[in-house]
Image (cartoon, rainbow, N blue to C red):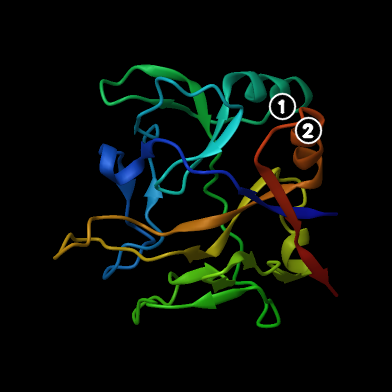
Amino acid sequence: MKYHIISYIKAPIGESGECCKSEYDFSNACDFCGTGAELVSHLKVKGFSKISKDFFETLDGDFIISKRIYEVIRKIKPDFILRPVIDLKGNILEYYHLYTSIVLPRFEVQSTGYVIDGQCDKCKRNGYFNHAIISPDKPTIVSPLNLIYKEPTIGFYQNELLLKTWECIGLSNKVAFGNNIVGYARPWIIVSHELKEIFESEKIIGIEFEEVIIIK
């Protein structure tokens, strides 16, 4: 049983989600900041007209896969269902939102490779960031992300191809104020080893995986 954090290491492309008027449910979200808001509509996007990639991340932190990759996955795993994304006029595009509503419990306190900054005092669920060493005269070094889960915890989800963390990357604003626009921090997305192998077999550019650490 292996799982991996998926990330995109190239420049983000296009906009999505809140700024495009996608619809969210706040039943299990923080009343104060909105972290944990659950997408209930097709992901609305803009700026996708000249994109020809099989996998990328938007400026708002949503992962997108091409119709081609989606069909490759579906041939192997017919029960794997994603929603296509739509443009601002409601037209269905040739891309799918790599998204799940299945939330893992909190990762173990021994986990490393992240920092917390500007976290909401109410939910303490956002404000997570990948730890990076930034130097003015050297390339930025991003620390390995070592998320740790106990075997019984993640074993409960062993038949799932796609999961997301309880913890969310970045900050959230349920209400715009000052220079802060409405936006909800996104979780880390975790894929099964089987899904990782499918992505790797297609030799997708810009994709990176870090294995989740599972302990007894």
The residue beneath circle 1 is 73
Residue drawn at point x = 65 percent, y = 40 percent: 206
Residue drawn at point x = 76 percent, y = 31 percent: 203
Quarter of the rendering containing residue 71 = top right
As rendered, which of 60 and 1 lies closer to the eye?
Answer: 60
The residue beneath circle 2 is 198
Residue drawn at point x = 51 percent, y = 58 percent: 187
Q: Are marks 2 and 1 in contact (CB under 8 Å)?
A: yes
Quadrant where the C terminus is found in the figure: bottom right
- Furthest-left residue in view? 178
- Residue 91, position as x, y percentages in the image: 34, 17
Looking at the image, residue 79 lies above or below residue 24: above
- Residue 157, position as x, y percentages in the image: 71, 54
Q: Secondary structure at mark 1?
A: helix
Spatial distance from mark 2 to mark 1, Cα to Cα? 7 Å
| Crowd class of label 1 (few under 14; some 14 to 19; many from 20; radius 10 Å) | some
As rendered, which of 46 and 188 lies closer to the eye?
Answer: 46
Q: Secondary structure at mark 2?
A: helix
In the rendered structure, the answer to whether residue 115 lies left or right of residue 172 reads right
